[in-house]
């Protein structure tokens, strides 16, 4: 009887110990998971709080600047450069990774420049460039200091638009502000970085940002292809694809033969091919039968496969646009140009 009792008593104790150990392991594992989750939540809350602290204040309107819009939706702004008495003409270009002046403008106004080891790429080639450092640009109600202008020859652009083009404004300016472009009223509003309420209509894009926004678009012709394209307000066309992207993706119908044409690039006129794609889509917005340029990008300016080409302002002008570079966002709202017919001329 005592032996039986001992067995009956000891066995439950052993089972209880095993259960206790198992329970302890489970409890410790659960505790570690909870602690990890709390740590991750703490980090996320800290980062969110830091983002809120960074933009604790609302964005403030700094200036309202009128602009002219040329063929293809290209935007021309007028601004004063340093001591030059006359206002100069600048193209607003999200496809520019900096800011620049025309070489002829520098000669006319005796603006000192210096040759550097910096090389810039553009549609048409690459070259070492001169710079004019730490200069000031003045708009009505806004003064932008410490800008480093690279120098380029914009004679071709001047001949195309029939008006002197003195420079291009890109990332060096856009990265400092929130910029709203109203193509209907031909006004550009510049805001300080901060909390900004987008219009309820439209969509917000979250492109990849280096110096130039690289946004996903959908192109459909022979087949549907999603690809990243530079968001380029300085290009007076709808879409340009590198030949390599078009070939590798097999996006184009083989039976449709592109026609040869010319476009204007950094080094002058460039031979390209022009075709039509059935559809280009960004978010929920679709455009049908869109003229598309094909470019043999020998210098890989479009940085394929990072980007398949660019989408230009003949398409982008159909949206009033907020460029929020500090937050790495772009908001677009269809405007009255949304349903404008496309220009299929190839001469």
Image (cartoon, grey):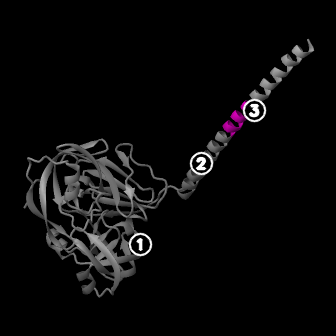
State the CA–CA distance, disc 2 to disc 1.
35 Å
Magenta part of the protein: which range?
21-31
Q: Pinpoint residue 78: horizontal percent, then vertical percent.
A: 29, 70
- Nearer the observer: mark 1 or 3; the answer is 3
Quick one: label 1, few (<14), some, or many (20+) residues within 10 Å? some
Residue occupying the point 57% across, 48% down: 44
Quick one: label 2, few (<14), some, or many (20+) residues within 10 Å? few
Question: Is residue 26 toward the left or the right of residue 2 in the image?
Answer: left
- Magenta stretch holds residue 30: yes
Would residue 341 be seen by someone viewing this image from the given angle?
A: no
Q: Are marks 1 and 3 in contact (CB under 8 Å)?
A: no
Secondary structure category for the residue under label 3:
helix
Residue at image mark 3: 21
Residue at image mark 2: 45
Q: Pinpoint residue 124: horizontal percent, then vertical percent.
A: 21, 70
Q: Pinpoint residue 37: horizontal percent, then vertical percent.
A: 62, 42
Residue at image mark 1: 144
Question: Is residue 99 toward the left or the right of residue 158 in the image?
Answer: right
Our reading of the magenta stretch's main secondary structure is helix
| N-term-proximal mark, 2 vs 3 | 3
Front in this rendered view, residue 242 or 196:
242
Residue occupying the point 27% across, 66% down: 301
Identify the residue at the far top of this view.
1
């Amino acid at each position: 009887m005592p032996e039986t009792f001992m067995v009956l008593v000891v066995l439950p104790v052993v089972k209880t110990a095993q259960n206790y150990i198992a329970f302890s392991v489970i409890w410790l594992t659960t505790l570690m998971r909870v602690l990890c989750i709390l740590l991750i939540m703490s980090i996320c809350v800290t980062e969110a709080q830091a983002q809120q602290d960074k933009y604790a204040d609302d964005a403030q309107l700094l200036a309202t600047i009128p602009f002219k819009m040329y063929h293809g939706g290209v935007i021309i702004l007028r601004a004063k450069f340093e001591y030059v008495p006359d206002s100069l003409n600048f193209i607003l270009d999200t496809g520019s990774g900096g800011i620049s002046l025309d070489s002829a403008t520098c000669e006319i106004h005796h603006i000192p420049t210096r040759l550097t080891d910096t090389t810039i790429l553009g549609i048409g080639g690459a070259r070492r460039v001169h710079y004019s450092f730490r200069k000031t640009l003045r708009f009505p109600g806004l003064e932008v200091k410490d800008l480093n202008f690279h120098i380029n020859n914009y004679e071709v652009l001047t001949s195309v638009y029939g008006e002197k083009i003195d420079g291009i404004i890109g990332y060096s300016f856009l990265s400092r502000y929130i910029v709203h472009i109203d193509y209907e009223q031909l006004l550009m509003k510049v805001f300080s970085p901060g909390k900004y309420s987008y219009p309820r209509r439209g969509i917000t894009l979250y492109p990849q940002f280096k110096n130039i926004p690289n946004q996903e678009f959908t192109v459909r012709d022979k087949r549907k292809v999603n690809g990243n394209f530079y968001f380029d307000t300085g290009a007076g066309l709808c879409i340009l694809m590198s030949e390599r992207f078009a070939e590798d993706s097999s996006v184009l119908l083989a039976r449709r033969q592109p026609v040869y044409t010319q476009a204007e690039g950094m080094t002058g006129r460039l031979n390209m091919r022009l075709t039509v794609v059935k559809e280009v889509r960004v978010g929920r917005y679709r455009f049908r039968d869109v003229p598309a340029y094909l470019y043999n990008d020998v210098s890989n300016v479009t940085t394929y496969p990072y980007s398949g080409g660019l989408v230009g302002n003949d398409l982008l002008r159909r949206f009033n646009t907020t460029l929020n570079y500090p937050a790495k966002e772009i908001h677009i709202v269809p405007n009255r140009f949304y349903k404008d017919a496309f220009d299929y001329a190839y001469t």
